Amino acid sequence: MAIITLRQLLDHAGEYGYGMPAFNITNLETMQAVLTAADRTGSPVLLQASRSARKHMDDTFLKHMFIAAAERYPHLPMCLHLDHGNEMRTCMSAIDLGFTSVMMDGSLREDAKTPSDYAYNVRTTSAVVEVAHARGVSVEGELGVLGSLETGMGEKEDGHGFDGKLDKSRLLTDPAEARAFVAATGVDALAVAIGTSHGAYKFSRRPTGDILAMEVIEAIHAELPNTHLVMHGASTISPDLQALINEHGGNIPKTFGVPLEEVERGIRSGVRKINIDTDNRMAMTGSMRKYLRENHASFDIRSALSPGRERSVALCMERNERFGAAGMAQRIKPISLPQMADRYLAGMLRLQVA
C-alpha cells in the first residue's frame, strides 16, 4: 500500500510545480469518485475528512475505508488528512485512527467559532506539531480567519466558522506574521486567508482583487518561498452545477466561487494544496435531484447515487489535470511514517525561514 504523508506529497508538488487538489469525502461514493478520477489520470490522492464527516461516517468505518482504498489502488500514493482540527484531542484521535496528516486550525478557539489571537494559535499549533512529527505525521496550520471580504462575515460549514463580523485585517493573512508563524510552529503547510470561505455562497459577483486577494498569496510566497501554501474554500461553484440543482427543484441563489484560473495563479505562487468540497456536494445532490425527479417510481438508492458519483469523477479528473497533478503518481516513491519521523527528529524537514 502506498500510504504517504502530506509533507511528502506537497514536497513533490513543490519540486515539480503542481497543485494538489484536496477532496473532502463524506461517504463511500464521494471517496470512490476521488479514487476513480485519480486512477484514470494517474494522480496522487489527497483525501480529507472534517470532524463532522468523521462523525457521519463513523471513525471505524472511515479507517477501514481508507485501508481498503489503499489496497484497491496500490499504485496510487495516498494521504488521509484531517480538515480543520479544532484542538489537540481531535488531532490525536485522527492520528491514532491512521490519518497521515492533520490540520490544527488555531485561528479559532476550540469551539471552532471564536477567533483566537496569534499567541494562542502558535501555542496550540506548535503542540500538535511536536506530537505529530514524533509519529511522522504532517501538520497544516492556519493563519488569518476565513471569511468574506465583501461582508466581513464567516460562512459556516459543518459548524465550523466564526460568529459575527470581523475587520478586513483579520480576514487577510499578514505576510510578515506568516513568516514568524512558520518559524515558530514548524508546520508543513500553511493555510492562508485571502477572502475565500466555505460553502456555496463565497462571492456575490465574479471575484476581483478587492474580494479575492490573490496578491496576498504572492506576497506570502515572496516571504516564504519554500513553504507549501493552502487555499481553503476553493470550489468553483460553476453555473452548470447551480443550474443542475435549480432545474430539478432546488433553490440556490446566484453565487460565484473561485475561478480555476485564479487557483492556477496561486499554484504559480506556492499554493500546493487546494481544498475542494462544495463542488462535489453540488454534483452529487444535483444529480440525485435530477434522477429522482425523472424517475418518480424509483426507490433504488444505487441508481440515485451513481449519476452523482460519475459527475464527481469528471469534476475530480478536471481538477487533477488543470492543477498539474495528473501523471504524477508514478513519480512518487513512498516514504513510511517511521522514516518521516526520523527525518523530523534529525531536523531534515524543518523549513528554513530566517
Image (cartoon, rainbow, N blue to C red):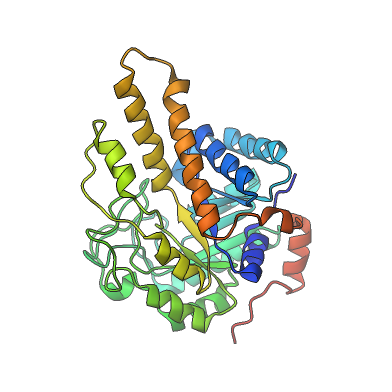
* Residue beneath the point at 31% across and 16% down: 296
Camera-side residue: 312 or 158?
312
Q: Please give left or right for residue 39 compared with residue 268 in the image.
A: right
* Residue beneath the point at 64% across and 35% down: 64
The quadrant the C terminus occupies is: bottom right
Tell me residue 108's x, y (percent). Answer: 39, 62
Tell me residue 96's x, y (percent). Answer: 64, 47
Q: Classify 310 as above or below 92.
A: above
Whether residue 88 is visible, yes or no, is no
* Residue beneath the point at 45% across and 22% down: 303
Tell me residue 312's x, y (percent). Answer: 47, 40
Count of number-bearing discs: 0
* Residue beneath the point at 49% across and 35% down: 310
Whether residue 189 is visible, yes or no, is yes
Camera-side residue: 319 or 191?
319
Please identify the quarter of the rendering in which residue 348 is found: bottom right
